[in-house]
Image (cartoon, helix red, strand yellow):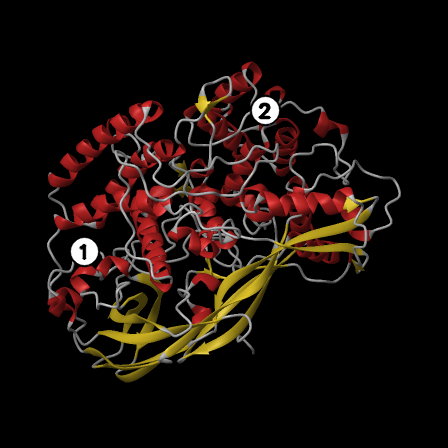
Amino acid sequence: MKSFTALAVLSVALLALGGHAKHIESKVADKDFLGKQKFVFDMMQHIYQDDVFVTEYPASYADYKPWAHVGDYNHPELLEHFFELWQHHPFHDDQVFSVMYERHEEYAIGLVRLFYFAKNWETFQHAVFWARQHVNKQLFVYAFTVVTIARDDMQGIILPAQYEIHPWSFFGAQTLEMAEHYKMHGFHHVKKMDNIYNVVLKSNYSNHYSNLNYDHEVAYFLEDVGFNSFYYYYNLDYPFWTKGSEHHVLNKDRRGELYLYTHWQLLARWYLERLSNDLGEVPTFNMYEPVATGYYSGLRSYSGVHDWHRDNHHNFYHDDNIEHIQDVELYTQRLMDWIHKNEKFDVEVINQLGNIIQGNADSIDKKFYGSLDKEYRHIVNGGHQVGKHYESYPGHFMHYETSLRDPLFYEVYKNLVGHYWHLMETFPEYKKHDYEFEGVKIDAVHMPESLTTYFEYFDSDISNAVNVEPVVEDKHDNLYSFGRNSHYNGVSYVIKARQHRLNHKPFEFTLDVSADKAQDAIVKVFIGPKHDEYGHIIPLEHNYQNFFELDHFKVHLDAGVTHIKRNSGDFFIWVNDRTTYLELYQKLMDASVSDYKFKLDQSEAHCGVPNRMMLPKGKKGGQVYQFFYMVYPFHETEVAQYTGYDPIISCGIGHGSRYVDALPFGFPFNRPIKHDYYFDVHNFKFFDVKIFHRDENTNVA
């Protein structure tokens, strides 16, 4: 389907980088696009209420039944099962949705297809409005988000942050109760700012009153809403249940290899943070023995049901889990047999392994190998049965947006990523000639010997967490009249949850690189530990899995010396924190009624990681880490980067052209390092850096 939204282009050069300039390009939405954006904003506010739309939609929307309009959809034969399923067993809010259940997966696939196959925008709107009124709301948000990413005519559309759409998955019950308190009391004693009731609540992490275990001490990291949102969106970019579409083929993006690398990097980042808090290695999950790591999420659902609490030394080996444990045993044995029969040593084998472990639609044999990823999630969920279909109540491990909150997540995925390292043991070890870049040398690294992290306040708009009254006739507030329905008696309100979030001072580096000829090259930057929790230096042979990738970019080397300068604000996977729902609505309103330009760009892309999370916290007295710099020959990809999509407004999922080069993810740390002297090459350089953490009382500009 072709996009029919015309956009004007703006290009803004922000930083000069050693002869190159990083450009953050943006586009300005036209009237047609603004109409689409408004519809999306309307659909995502106060999702559990279907009678509070300020915008008036024609009667055709309320009366719409998609099965009565099959001619308005492409591939209607693929919608028959969903229509049949819905008319016999509709999926409402009396059930708790999780795509981890096969029955729920059916509904998710059907609803995504309904949205995706709509032939035009008008049909799409009707289908979305129908689902918004009738379908389980978590299922609705899941499907609507997947399709917003996938449909060509929605490229550039901004979704509010997931933690603002569904704050119940990110903020504790205490915060939500206080939000409701202010609304119930009519915002008594609350001052208006710009004619908006403005409430700011201090939102605590789940360890505010006590630590259940040592890991709980790091709740600021585990429960960071931006980090958890990144993982949520990653799994919606690459849903396990689909191969994608004819124009968005997920396996073109090496989805299996990306799955393994994403989780390897999450593990590495978690270990760096643990060292800042004097914690040791991440344990491996043992499903036969009591697990030391307990967890209390503090979350509750919209209906008031609290997430179940896990005590320290909880035993997962019980009757409700036996079937899943047996499946893990069976699938693990089959997987290990496949690994040890491997005789190929290329990226495609790694990609196959990731697809097998996840059990996605591109697995070489999903029935035979199952999904270890899903089976482990069921085991940790613990078999707490609820509901008429005898499914277990889906706790935080059964939802992508809450998985990272639990330190057990990292123990489980250490097991799963461990299969990658088993496969890598069958690959030949890289030798010195595999690392060298003939004629190229890093002469020097220039960067600060100390970096600084700190906590700062960050506000999220959780207005969605509070129910609102139906539409009032006396609309004496412009924002409310425009369509934002967070109101009290027709006057807009905003409720913000304020948390301390980890951040760091900006830094930059310069590499002095000499080359015997002009040529293209790749620069990679990693950060890794120097010492373990006891202060002992970790040999590279035992440390290579712990390096976390910070940056990866292409450069042109001149003959002679090239100075490559790079600022931390330009690192490639990192994005700014999301603009709040209220601010987005205000910008959209201004663009709709005035000359204000509603800009679209990738500075807050859903596929990026919050740049606040780049560095581990460190310590007040300083914690030594090591940066690793690599300059390496450029390996051209099969399809040139950015082919088939517009990188200004899209992450390019499924086009096979997202990546800057064809190197294996994680190179040069992607295979076991058994002889550290192979790393003694001129184009590699380690650099020690001490990271200091400054508390709020000493952190002054």
Q: Residue at x 41, y 57 (%)?
A: 642
Disc 1, SS: loop
Residue 340 in sight in this render: yes
Q: Mark 2 near mark 1, Cβ–Cβ under 8 Å?
A: no
Q: Is residue 73 above or below residue 31?
A: above
User: Which circle's residue, 2 or 1, is located before the other in the chain?
Assistant: 2
Q: Quadrant of the C terminus?
A: bottom right
Residue nearer the viewer, 49 or 329: 329
Q: Amino acid at mark 1?
A: Arg
Task: Give the total number of marks visible in the rendering.
Answer: 2
In the image, farthest residue toward the top: 88
Q: Is residue 275 above or below residue 66?
A: below
Q: Mark 2 sits on what residue?
A: 94
Q: Which image quadrant for residue 241?
A: top left
Label of residue 318 in the image:
none
Q: Residue at x 32, y 22 (%)?
A: 319
Residue nearer the viewer, 242 or 667: 667
Residue 566 in sight in this render: no
Disc 2, SS: loop
Q: Amino acid at mark 2?
A: Asp
Residue 208 appears left or right of 539: right
Q: Mark 1 sits on what residue?
A: 671
Within 10 Å of disc 1 (Cα), the crowding (few <14, some 14-19, many 20+) is many
Residue 482 appears left or right of 320: right
Residue 669 picture location, percent across and down: 23, 60
Residue 288 picture location, percent across and down: 25, 33
